[in-house]
């Protein structure tokens, strides 16, 4: 699992303050609205909407907020905003490749904000998607289950790969089109996923063993993530576990 994925998990475990939680709810609402507009409001028939709602629930978004977002997208009053999905690519500090997935109602504003962050660290916007592949990613907490049992259940459900980033969880990888089917099969087998999404996974990685450089890259990624229009940031850096533990201790 990449350093970025580890860092994201750490931040989730530590929790977020009210301001950051409000910003997260805004991003989750945009995803729910866009998914419902594109595929309808039925969670069983719209796997993108189901993943968006599951992610919202995992982040403690109130059920009323979720319902309102779906109603806004599927109602006849045209209340819901229209968002354009745009992807930006480039290199950040340490030549780390980054893909930024944005959802915006103002393309010029979003492009300007993202370009500014890249420029401040000496980065550049340029194609890097060849260093990534699209995969379904399902996180599962073992909760006392035998990891071999969960791994076999994932393989039986159609997983293409399984990894164990730590003793208490496994990560299941699928083809993008199979993520919802595998998620549902695992849930039915008693292994409810913590999250399920289609992600851009790096095929090559930049190892960051220097603390100063690791912090610089993490701060760069966090600045991108904090932009209102940015939904996801994918990066190909990796940080050794020992160094990640030091960085984790500094998270407040």
Image: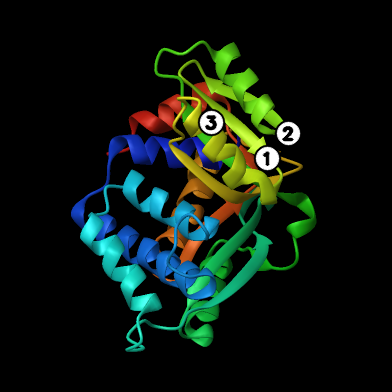
Quadrant of image for the C terminus: top left
Return the disc, 2 or 1, that comes first in the chain's sequence: 2
Q: Is residue 240 above or below residue 101?
A: above
Q: Please state if 110 lies on the left or on the right of 56 as rendered.
A: right
Return the disc, 2 or 3, that comes first in the chain's sequence: 2
Q: Position of residue 189 (x, y in %)?
A: 50, 25
Is any part of residue 134 visible from this angle? Answer: yes
In which quadrant of the rendered view does residue 149 lie?
A: top right
Pointer 2: what residue? Answer: 160
Q: Which numbered marker is on residue 174?
A: 1
Eye-nearest disc, 2 or 3: 3
Q: Residue furthest right?
A: 130
- In the image, 56 versus 182, the foreground residue is 182
> Mark 2 Cα within 10 Å, few/some/many (few <14, many 20+)?
some
- In the image, 85 versus 64, the foreground residue is 64
> Marks 2/3: CA distance?
14 Å
Residue appearing at x 55%, y 79% in the figure: 111
Residue appearing at x 27%, y 41% in the figure: 15
Marks 1 and 2: in contact by CB < 8 Å?
yes
């Amino acid at each position: 699992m990449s350093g970025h994925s580890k860092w994201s998990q750490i931040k989730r475990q530590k929790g977020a303050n009210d301001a950051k939680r409000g910003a997260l709810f805004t991003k989750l609402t945009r995803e729910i609205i866009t998914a419902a507009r594109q595929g309808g409001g039925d969670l069983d028939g719209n796997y993108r909407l189901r993943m968006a709602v599951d992610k919202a629930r995992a982040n403690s978004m109130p059920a009323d907020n979720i319902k309102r977002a779906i109603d806004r997208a599927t109602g006849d009053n045209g209340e819901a905003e229209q968002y354009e999905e745009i992807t930006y690519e480039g290199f950040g500090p340490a030549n780390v490749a980054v893909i930024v997935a944005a959802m915006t109602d103002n393309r010029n504003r979003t492009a300007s904000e993202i370009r500014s962050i890249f420029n401040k660290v000496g980065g550049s916007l340029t194609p890097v998607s060849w260093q990534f592949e699209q995969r379904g990613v399902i996180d599962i907490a073992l909760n006392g289950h035998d990891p071999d049992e969960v791994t076999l259940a994932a393989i039986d459900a159609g997983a293409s790969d399984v990894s164990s980033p730590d003793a208490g969880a496994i990560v299941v990888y699928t083809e993008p089109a199979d993520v919802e089917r595998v998620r549902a099969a695992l849930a039915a087998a008693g292994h409810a996923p913590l999250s399920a999404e289609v992600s851009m996974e790096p095929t090559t990685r930049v190892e960051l063993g220097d603390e100063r450089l690791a912090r610089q890259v993490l701060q760069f990624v966090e600045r991108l993530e904090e932009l209102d229009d940015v939904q996801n940031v994918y990066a190909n850096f990796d940080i050794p576990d020992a160094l990640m533990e030091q960085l984790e201790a500094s998270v407040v």
